[in-house]
Amino acid sequence: MRDKESYFISLFPSDLIGDDGAVVGERIYSSDLFCEGVHFRREWLSLEQIAYKSLLVNISDAIAMNAHPRYMLLNVKLPSSLSPDEMRELAKGFLRGCEEYGIQIIGGDTVAGETLDIAITLISHSEAPLFRSRVKIGDLIGFTGILGSVGADLERLLEGKEIDADSKFIIPTLRDRFLYKAAPYLNAAMDISDGLSKDLSRLSKINKIGFEFTTPLDRATLCSGEEYEILFSVCANHVEQISRIAQETQTPITLFAKAVKGTYQSICKEHHFE
């Protein structure tokens, strides 16, 4: 089976499933796992960096939906070998992210295990959430930032090489300043967690559309996962406003395709399932 993730999710049908978070009234609930051996290895990141990144990748979901995170449920599987000093270092990363984004930890759970695994649920607020399902035929499709570096740095780590301390693999660049200002002009948005091509296939499926590429993109750009940039659609009439906001917030954007009738299939391998 090529896409076990989508198949498993399909076993739990709900109108609230399908976006970066579930919208219930003005609250948005989102949850993510950050697991040792899947998303990171302990030798690659400090405990503080692991905790901080695990929170940032969750915040990225809220940002993509034009939501402001408020509360957090934290669940951690802690290796039995972790010392009190190491637990304090781990907590430091969570507290750092919470302070930066105004989030209050209100509960959760801990359990002992062989690996360090983190599950975070965020409760966010939005009066005008953005959805994946609002792409319109003729919309221009774009993304923030420059894609590809995370995949390249992951390959370096897997080869036993070092990466720069400011790598986006270590600290994702979140686009809250751009997104919150641009949201009124966007039709749809999602964060790029599993690679641009994979996330385009999700947009294609939920909107029943295809894409006409106006800018050629290489495989590194299409397949680099865990970028946590924003994939968005915008009607042509609002491109000027989006470009102005991108310049004001110093956010690189690339408009690379147009939504058309048809379908689109990801060209990349699955990141979490073989």
Image: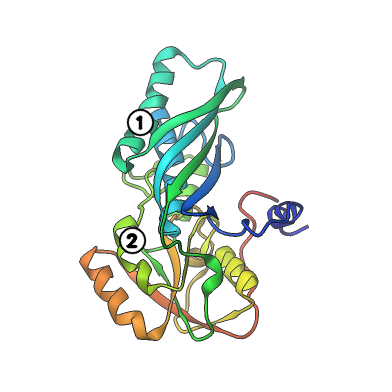
Give the residue type at disc 2: Tyr
Q: Quadrant of the N terminus?
A: bottom right
Where is 226 relative to 34, above or below? below
Task: Using the image, tell me which numbered label, if any, was put on residue 18.
Answer: none
Is residue 127 something that shows in the picture? yes
Question: For the residue labelled by badge 1, is the local secondary structure a helix, a strand or a loop?
Answer: helix
Q: Quadrant of residue 66?
A: bottom left
**Where in the figure is residue 261, as x and y percent of width and height?**
61, 86
Residue that appears at 42% across and 82% down: 235
Where is 124 relative to 270, above or below? above
Where is 67 relative to 183, above or below? above
Frontmost of labels 1 and 2 is 2
**Where in the figure is residue 132, as x and y percent of width and height?**
53, 66
Q: Which residue is mark 1?
A: 95
Counting residues from the start of the chain, the first of labels 1 and 2 encountered is 1
**Where in the figure is residue 139, as x and y percent of width and height?**
47, 82
Give the residue type at disc 1: Leu
Question: For the residue labelled by badge 2, is the local secondary structure a helix, a strand or a loop?
Answer: helix
Q: Which residue is mark 2?
A: 180
Q: Nearer the viewer, residue 165 or 71?
A: 71
Q: Quadrant of residue 10?
A: bottom right
Residue that appears at 49% across and 28% down: 107
Residue that appears at 61% across and 69% down: 201
